[in-house]
Amino acid sequence: MNTLHTYLQEHQHSILDDIETLVRAESPSNDKAAVDACGQLLRQLFQDRLQCQAETFPQTEKGDHLGFTLGEGDRQILILGHFDTVWDIGRLAIRRETDKFYGPGILDMKAGIVQAIWAVKALVELDALPNARIRFLCTSDEELGSPTSRQRIEEESVASDVVLVVEPATANGSALKTARKGSGRFYMHITGKAAHAGNNPEEGVSAIEELSHQIQYLHSLADPSLGTTVNVGMVHGGGPLNVVPEKAELGIDVRVTMLEEAERLYNAIYQSTPFHPSVTLTVSGDMTRPPMERTHATARLFELAQHAAGELGIELTEASVGGGSDGNFAAAKGIPTLDGLGATGAAPHAEYEHIEIASIVPRAAILAALIRQV
């Protein structure tokens, strides 16, 4: 395993240059032209480093998704990543410092994709590639909840023996992610009855008053003991102050650790009833990601990663986190899934998003050793 580390250490400058190339191809999720331009650079990286041709899954409005395959065998190892980001073009500066590398999407998660390419390249160059197909799936809309890639992710996952997700490690740490919460987004639209607030308020039905009752109800659905959270994060309604408000709406974020809780919340939100008999409620939305639950198979994958890290003198820990990833979809299909195998750093989705330069080679070496073992 130290041979893998040595090879990657010898190519650290090239790895950093490849990360910078990908980061400079800024790719906000809703800008198809920019995302596809980034995809073209990604194709070139795979061609240059692994002599892999891209399989394209074209999209009408979002960026195209890309697949790459090398190696042969009865088993398939799926490496999962995304190359879209949350940042508008030009929003963040790209710069290297002595120990940190800053840029839009560098932590979440372009560095992880590059590390995975080089991890596999090290295995190829050292004639250590396992007897398996190595399949990369690089998607373009993860930051939007993966609306166009979910089906592809699920199909690729069920055709695989294991799924390795090169999302970043835990923020300000290096832990791998063996469990993630599932998430949902729901919207409630409330219709009351308008009236003059001074002359005949009794003839009106306040949508905002109803909204206040619904918020209390929705928050009561949370169960912290089970890791279930409910957050009404958006409210809107009313208009002129002298009018009893007729319309109001709210947006709801939910997070769950178990499929049973996802089903409970879904049913409870859709079965919401008005507090005022003259109010009309309509609900829309759904669970956008199922929970990634820790299983014995996931624990076994983590043990293999721990062993690989131990041979490099690195202590590796695991964590359960509140945010979701495309790994949630793979895990929900019953496929052993290990997440957080990408870069270490801090501030994903924040202005000082960065990776730790010193961790790039060790993390890539751990991933290479894990691929070799599974």
Image: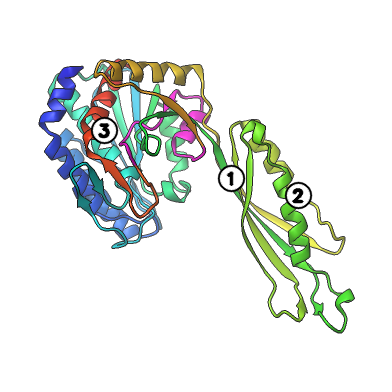
* Magenta residue span: 322-345
Q: Is residue 246 above or below residue 147?
A: below
Residue beneath the point at 29% across and 54% down? 36
| Residue 7 placement, left or right of 268 | left
Where is mark 1, residue-wise? 184
Q: Residue 357: image x %, image y %?
A: 22, 39
Does residue 60 show up? Answer: no
Q: Which mark is nearer the camera, 3 or 2?
A: 2
Q: Residue 288: image x %, image y %?
A: 55, 44
Q: Are marks 2 and 1 in contact (CB under 8 Å)?
A: no
User: What kind of residue is marked 3?
Assistant: Ala
Look at the numbered disc 2 and give the secondary structure of its residue: helix
Colour scheme of the picture = rainbow
Q: Which mark is nearer the camera, 2 or 1?
A: 2
Where is mark 2, residue-wise? 217
Q: Are marks 3 and 2 in contact (CB under 8 Å)?
A: no
Q: Earlier in the sequence, mark 1 or mark 3?
A: 3
